[in-house]
Image (spheres, grey):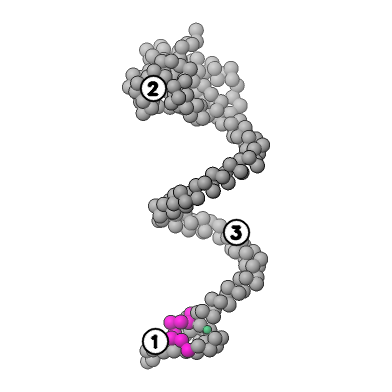
Amino acid sequence: MPNNEEQTKECTKCGQEKPLSGFYKNKMRRFGVRSQCKVCVLAQMKQYRQENRDKVLEQKKQYRQKNKDKIVEREKQHYQENKDKILEQKKQYYQKNKDKISERVKQYRQENKDKISAQNKQYRQNLPSMIYEIHNTITKQIYVGQTSYGRQRWNGHKHKLRKGIHGNPQLQKDWDKWGKDAFRFNIVEELPCDFNTEQLLEKEAALMLEHISNGAKLYNEDIPE
Ligand SMILES: [Zn+2]
């Protein structure tokens, strides 16, 4: 039996004498390896890819389309297994290219101003209407509200409270006193984005009255009759 470590073979392309480990395996061939060495095979593959760029890209595209589910699953698994590494790389890339990225974002926003504002408008229009409450988990006092801007309304409240300019003085006072962690946003009822405003106000009023009749204290100043 020949020792594979010492066995060598001549590459039919470059003519160099190389150990068998320098060749890709091919069971059909003599010595069980391809006739050309790894270096030559790779060089040829590279040349082929360069000369047939469009064809190769098309093949890749077709492969991706055919194996979409498999590829997505594989990428998902890869991400899960390497999450920390990937996030760290992304962070480092961002830190290194911060100025370049923010410049690019700024430029994109300027160039697509109309498109972005139309998208934002559509996004807001599609947000659900809702009846919501803001709970002070310490004092149990409740703010009842209605909105056609979905959860964004909560962000609006928080933004004003953080800045100290909320329209409800008592809520602002408690936010300053207890801090944001004392408050919970609670969706009572989610409704279609085009839900009738009057009915929304009626639902809001009904909820306020229910709380009052249960002895709860409300932040709302305008309590319905
Ligand atoms: Zn070779």
Amino acid tagged 3: Gln
Which is more N-terminal, label 3 or label 1? Answer: 1
Query: Where in the figure is residue 74, as x and y percent of width and height?
Result: 48, 58
Give the percent coordinates (x, y) of residue 30: 49, 89
Name the residue tied to disc 3. Answer: 65
Label 1 SS: loop
Instruction: Identify the residue at image location x=62%, y=32%.
Output: 121
Q: CA distance from mark 3 to mark 2?
A: 53 Å
Looking at marks 1 and 2 on the same chain, the residue that comes earlier in the sequence is marked by: 1
Q: Which percent across, then down, holds residue 75?
A: 48, 56
Q: Secondary structure at mark 3?
A: helix
* Residue at the extreme front of the image, as rendered: 99
**Magenta stretch bounds:** 17-24
Residue at position x 56%, y 25% in the image: 148
> Cα distance, mark 1 to mark 3?
42 Å
Residue type pointed to by label 2: Trp
Quarter of the rendering containing residue 114: top right
Q: Position of residue 67 (x, y in %)?
A: 56, 60
Q: Is residue 207 visible?
A: no
Comparing marks 1 and 2, which lies closer to the viewer? 2
Per the image, label 2 sits on a secondary structure element best described as: helix
User: Badge 2, how many Cα within 10 Å: few under 14, some, many 20+?
Assistant: many
Position of residue 31 relative to residue 123, above or below, is below
Q: Nearer the viewer, residue 99 or 148?
A: 99
Q: CA distance from mark 1 to mark 2?
A: 77 Å
Disc 2 target residue: 175
**Residue flagged by tag 1: what amino acid is it?**
Asn
Considering every residue shown, the one lying at the far bottom of the view is 1
Q: Is residue 26 left or right of residue 58?
A: left
Q: Residue at x 55, y 28 (%)?
A: 149
Residue carrying label 1: 4
Left or right relative to 133: residue 191: right
